[in-house]
Image (cartoon, rainbow, N blue to C red):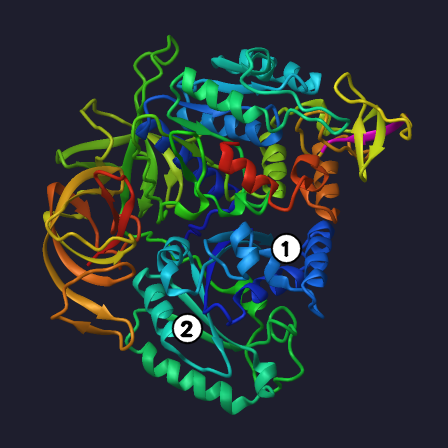
Amino acid sequence: MNNYLLKHLKELESESIYIIREVFAQFDNPAILFSGGKDSIVLTHLAIKAFWPAKIPFPLVHIDTGHNFPETITYRDWLINQIGAKLIVGYVQNSIDTGRTKEETGSNASRNTLQTITLLDTISEHQLDACMGGARRDEEKARAKERVFSHRDEFGQWNPKNQRPELWNLFNGKKLVGEHFRVFPISNWTEMDIWQYILAEKIEIPSLYFSHKREVIHRNGSILATSPYITVRNDETVTQKTVRYRTCGDMTITGAIESTASTVEEIINEVAASRITERGSREDDKRSETSMEDRKKQGYF
Amino acid sequence: MELLRFTTAGSVDDGKSTLIGRLLYDSKSIFIDQLEAITKISNRKGLDHIDLSLLTDGLKDEREQGITIDVAYRYFATPKRKFIIADTPGHIQYTRNMVTGASTANVALILIDARKGVIEQTYRHSFIASLLQIPHLIVCVNKMDLVNFDEKVFNDIVSVYENFASKLDVKDIRFIPISALQGDNVVNRSENTNWYQGSTLMHTLENMHIGSDQNHIDPRFSVQTIIRPHTTSYHDFRSYAGRIDGGVFRKGEEVLVLPSGLKNTIKSIFYGNTEITEAFPPMSVSMTLTDEIDISRGDIIVKQNNQPEVSQDVEVMFCWLNENPLNFSGKYFLKHTTNGVRAVFKEIVYKIDMKTISRNETDKAIFTNDIFRAKIRTTKPLLFDPYRKNRNTGSLILVDEVTNETLAAGMIV
């Protein structure tokens, strides 16, 4: 008698492919929000599987803060070329230049929250009605509460108190003109699942995730890379360390970890033994206890 | 390693969030920064212990009020299994959230406060778990530390519950005496309950058999979308993409496409870009067929000798999820597998009185959280199985045509 029980990665993969296909079927103008981080890379890989042997039938959208790691941009351009997908880029710099948003000041300045305006403007300009992102529920406590098909009002805002009941695998993507959805096909994947999948599928990822030497400073308990976007304070010293990144946000807010892990297997061992959460080194999450929830209410990812 | 989804139900003070926190804490699934964060908050609140419920109460309002408002998903894995927990509110006003979290669960944990025993909430949650056909129930009698780990208290509760459970449609019910606060029988065996011969909660979750939870008997493949590459290398390629909702499909088998009723043969089955010979739930695949016929989203591929029911008149057990009462003469949008039709109510057969779990055939007014049986009529025939046979082809939702809200969850009888 055959064993008809799927291994967990296959079950998660099937669920995500199902969700991606539903988005394509239910919406007129969907897109994948692509950041160049491992989650959006896995999401893109899943989309390729979902529509094989056809190409992905919708664009990848990148909100470029201007503060990205150069490695992220290099990877993005390589991937687009590789899979023959269409790329739409929304530039936060444009939003600043046109007065839509203002640059933060001070030594802890970041463009993280500014992305929301650029994102909403890009969605509006291209009339995207569904944006798929690589957010996972295990990442952060506000994300843990979000639906897979997450409705956004005409202002792009998320209302956590009024989410639609989501039952079985029946996703209600109905909306009024001007509204859109954010969809999270890998909601149920954990950080470890992502890495195991990257290993199993031999997915190429940016070099940032692997050990390398970098000039850094120590600030607020985090190791931050020096860059044109960070102002080194008088009491901070620049040192060279062997580090890698567990998560890849902007250079201004993403903390590195000291590590010699240079293969996916080594990364997996390190993550497994890790005592700190993946986003524990994200300065953007530390701004307040409800930082993510507050940003989402404004229209963030 | 397999995936097990379970949901937790209990009243606000039954210790549900503490139980989950305990599962994560004792299985070493909590990270240091999370622990530091909740220790800090617990101290700030003046507590003399770490409030593990803070791990799951994620939204601002929840943390302030100390209750769970929405469904929270937590993830952890042991070397044996990966787990997804849907932590759901115990409050009656959030029944819809419990239904949401419970719909895809393999297991429901029902929490009972040992001091209070079985209460109205217990009946409600157990009934919902049964209605949603969650295959396994684990009844955790919590706060045993507050009743001196008294065996009689535990047995009395089991007895009352078993009496009520005879009305439920659940095949597998287990009982475990625990103390989420102190950790007895959650992950580690308790020394205070030597009279208890069963397993700990974690051991039960890791080892229970879930292989039979999906329907592997009745072949059902709901078409989601058609894949047509239109490229030179795949010029005439056309495949039908979707999820296997039931049974098993194999390369070369003869199938029947509904509603057209046309016969066809499976040429190939693909999982991603890999060809496979056999597909079963819940795999997402794409199939090519030997004959070129018209197939679209909403169609279902089955076998000639095992067909779903077809009808525009269906009897359904509903849970009304919306704040506004049901408008009996309203027209609703209905979603079933990959189909969308319109539906109207023909008759409310009965409401369930959640206090006694009995049928009320006189009161037909339907309000939020009500569970009722109704006859509906749809604009086009539905191709379905009774929910008891197949949770995928027997479930549906009603959507408001004006506000687009999901109004009700339905299980076809």
Q: Nearer the viewer, residue A165 or B251?
A: A165
Identity of the amino acid at label 1?
A: Pro
x and y, in percent, of residue B184 in the image: 63, 76
Mark found first going from the N terminus, 1 or 2: 1
A256 is higher (above) or lower (below) than A48: below
Residue B307 visible? The answer is no
The residue tagged with tag 1: helix, strand or loop?
loop
Give left or right: position of B30 versus B255: right
Q: Nearer the viewer, residue B263 or B230?
A: B230
The residue drawn where x is 67% and y is 23% is A206
B85 is higher (above) or lower (below) than B126: above
Q: Is residue A99 magenta?
A: no
**Residue lying farthest top?**
B232
The residue drawn where x is 50% and y is 41% is A187
Q: Give the overall secondary structure of the magenta segment.
A: strand
Magenta region: A239-245
Q: Which residue is mark 1?
A: B79
Identity of the amino acid at label 2?
A: Ile
B30 is higher (above) or lower (below) than B164: above
Q: Which residue is mark 2?
A: B173
The residue tagged with tag 2: helix, strand or loop?
strand
Q: Chain of mark 2?
A: B
x and y, in percent, of residue A258 in the image: 82, 35
Q: Nearer the viewer, residue B191 or B264?
A: B191
| Disc 1 to disc 2, C-alpha distance | 25 Å
* Mark 2 surroundings within 10 Å by alpha-carbon count, few (fewer than 14), some (14 through 19), many (20 or more): some
